[in-house]
Amino acid sequence: MRMEGGTSVILRVEMDKHAVTFGELVSLIGQQGGDIVAIDVIQPGRKMEIRDLTVSVAEPSVVDTLSKAVSIMKGIHLVNVSDRTFLLHLGGKIQVQSKVPIKNRDDLSRVYTPGVAKICLAIRDDPNKAHSLTIRRNTVAVVSDGTAVLGLGDIGPLAAMPVMEGKAMLFKELAGVDAFPICLDTKDTEEIIAIVKALAPTFGGINLEDISSPRCFEIERRLKEQLDIPVFHDDQHGTAVVLLAGLLNALKIVGKNIGEIKVIVCGIGAAGVACSRMLLAAGVKHLIGVDKDGAIHRGANYDNEVWNEFATLTNPNNETGRLSEVIGGADVFIGLSRPKLLNREDVLKMNPDPIVFAMANPDPEISPEEAGSYVRVYATGRSDYPNQLNNVLAFPGIFRGALDARASTISESMKLAAAKAIAAIVTDEELNEEYIIPSVFNDKVVPAVRKAVIQEAIHSGIARKVPGDFRNLE
Ligand SMILES: NC(=O)C1=CN([C@@H]2O[C@H](COP(=O)(O)OP(=O)(O)OC[C@H]3O[C@@H](n4cnc5c(N)ncnc54)[C@H](O)[C@@H]3O)[C@@H](O)[C@H]2O)C=CC1
Ligand SMILES: CC(=O)C(=O)O
Ligand SMILES: [Mg+2]
């Protein structure tokens, strides 16, 4: 089922041309399972020469053995082995670009002092003008404290930056939204709230990212109360929107009714809580949340207040026990926890035509190889397997819509509208086990989500502006 297993690396080699020929090196790399796809001469020379060889291999594990064989070859000094992903990250992935050039004094006096002063005063006199005269109307802060980065856990704010830069890139590339990655060196709830609140004048929206639960719930709730711009914890709501879209379509394939299915949600953290809430709102009646210590149930007194409330809303038969015990008779498994928590025996206990959404990143709760043909509809958060259920399908269009409508918040009904819009992109003719959700690269996704979000924002009075393309529709 895997679509692309290969990888490529760049070997920088210094060759002593009197001791070894390039042909000998090429044939050694071939024997070791590598395929040279590009050659760059970095430093030519009669005797010593430095070349970069881009080598493609079928399995990442081949890189080590191949590099070792090259490094001990006579006449070769292996200077460096660079993974292409590392190279892509050199110096970071995004930059700030000016919209107008500064070529002369006249330009300078208009973009900066003295000309800029009258713009400042206009905003002082009418703060609403910040929306039209600054970057605010198109700019989102992607804020993380690095405590729940993908499924890697608490890796800290510095290590979280590549993910936040990646989110900022996705905002720009997919929806034209300018986004700034902001990684905070604090885990303190009060401090995070105060910092984000103080940053708000710069931004038209706040995307909270990879902040661990349960702190993320209070941080989001309090910021929503205090700010009049959208505050959206993407791991909660972006994920929930995409999950619901995928589930609505998967249920059509297996011919089951959302009100009659048993759903297991594994990992009751940020994403798990929000996804469960969205599923309950969409009509699921039998949902059991499972975390490290087993099923969340009534009668247990959890330190986590959110779990105590969760127990009252879920698990109608108050089942207890570990994942392998409560999964019997389930129709749907949703993983928002950690890699490799679900095995084939668990899947075999599920009802016929099981749906398994193993959404932990970077590695799912069960691999497609292990799920095999035992699962009727299988999806992950990854781009290299079919059915990528990833919040990237939601957040760019949701923020595009919210910014264009100057929405003060992103409401439950705006999220539900976004989920239905994503699901509807897959037509009944197209729908099948390996195509329940449109691709991230489907150019209908962002416009459809934007439209649904704006329509709902206008309908519910959350929009503070009707975008031009909606005015004729009123
Ligand atoms: N595909 C997608 O779009 C998204 C995927 N995710 C993935 O979901 C996972 C969770 O993310 P967050 O909710 O943000 O993190 P989180 O840290 O808030 O929640 C993780 C939860 O998993 C639980 N957990 C850990 N070990 C477990 C076990 N053995 N059994 C059951 N539960 C266990 C933790 O106790 C915690 O409650 C991560 O792998 C993340 O990459 C998150 C957001 C979006
Ligand atoms: C996709 C995402 O936001 C995550 O895995 O945390
Ligand atoms: Mg995330």
Image (cartoon, rainbow, N blue to C red):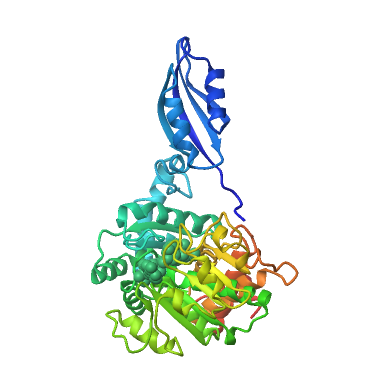
Considering only vertical position in the picture, is 253 above or below 309?
Answer: above
Residue situated in front as seen by the camera: 387 or 320:
320
Residue 396 lies, in percent from the top left, at 52, 64
Q: What quarter of the picture does the C terminus occupy?
A: bottom right
Q: Quadrant of residue 155?
A: bottom left
Residue 235 lies, in percent from the top left, at 43, 68
Residue 191 lies, in percent from the top left, at 24, 68
Considering only vertical position in the picture, is 135 above or below 331?
Answer: above
Query: Can residue 158 be spotted in the picture?
Result: yes
Q: What residue is shown at x 48% (from left), y 33% (from top)?
A: 10
Query: Can residue 410 be spotted in the picture?
Result: no
Answer with left or right where residue 194 lies relative to residue 311. Answer: left
Q: How many marks?
A: 0
Q: What residue is shown at x 41% (from left), y 51% (from top)?
A: 110
Residue situated in front as seen by the camera: 355 or 227:
355
Q: Quadrant of residue 217?
A: bottom left
Answer with left or right where residue 289 lies relative to residue 397. Answer: left
Q: Quadrant of residue 379?
A: bottom right
Of all residues, the one furthest to the right in this rendering is 429
Q: What quarter of the picture does the N terminus occupy?
A: bottom right
Residue situated in front as seen by the camera: 305 or 142:
305
Considering only vertical position in the picture, is 117 above or below 318?
Answer: above
Residue 139 lies, in percent from the top left, at 44, 61
